[in-house]
Image (tube, rainbow, N blue to C red):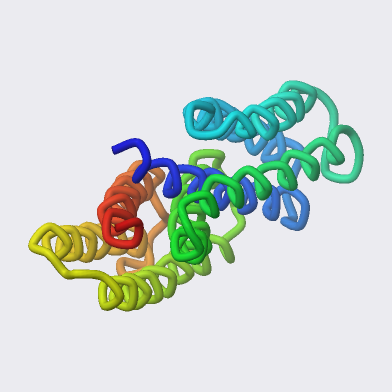
Amino acid sequence: MYAYVAPSLVSAILGAQLVLSLALLKGEICPGQRGRFHRAYWVLVFAWVILVPSSFLATIPFLFLGLFAFRSKTGKTRHSGPIPLLHVANLTACVAWLIITASQGWMVAVFGLLQIVLLGASAGHGLLVRAKSRLQAFDNLLPLASVLALMATVLLVAVAASLTTFTTLNINALFAGVGLGLLGIAASIWHLLKNTKPAWWRLMIGFGFLFAASVSLNTIVMG
């Protein structure tokens, strides 16, 4: 079971890490927001630990991201401080993602690219809202990115299924994945439909559904 979880987990962590980094480095944020963003990184630091059994390389982004989060407790770090550590952490995270997914085959790696968008946008959005981000553009664009990624994911899974023997187990996994994915998308875009502020707990519930959907669809892609 862990073999099906690892590709989705590493894609979610990398995607969320890139979303936070983009908001931190390019967003118009105040020092107070910056401090809350730094604390959000600790969630990802501990998430990398879960991946160590899958690949020892996960310890490298864990160490660099942890060092960045630790040294970011004081001072402004948008244009100075340990920003180079953040870049190294992102680079090593990309390498770890590539090794973990590519070791499962090229189809899993392609599927992982979509999961970076699907799961990363969802998890990253939840972390930003939890950090009380006032970057409204992210509130609008990240859910839409998840919608497009889910559509592409289902299409890719359909192609992968056509290349293998379609069993009852695969049919169940496909229906479960699509159903869970739609629930996750509904939770992710709820604030857009109701024209309200996004709630972090609803976004994380949506992420949970999307993550479960990805794991279910992994069983088809990985054969």
Q: How many marks?
A: 0
Question: Residue 142 versus residue 176: which sits nearer the camera?
Answer: 176
Q: Quadrant of the N terminus?
A: top left
Question: Residue 53 versus residue 116: which sits nearer the camera?
Answer: 53
Q: Quadrant of the C terminus?
A: bottom left
Query: How far across and down, in percent of the image, does residue 198 sit?
Result: 41, 54
Task: Look at 83% across and 44% down and name the residue there.
Answer: 78
Judge whether residue 139 can be spotted in this image: no
The residue lying furthest to the right in this view is: 80
Query: How far across and down, in percent of the image, does residue 127 sit?
Result: 51, 42
Query: How far across and down, in percent of the image, does residue 194 sit?
Result: 31, 66
Is residue 79 found left or right of 86 in the rendered image? right
Task: Look at 50% across and 32% down and name the residue there.
Answer: 51
Task: Look at 72% across and 56% down and name the residue there.
Answer: 27
Is residue 200 found left or right of 137 in the rendered image? left
**Quadrant assignment, res 147:** bottom left
Is residue 13 found left or right of 32 in the rendered image? left
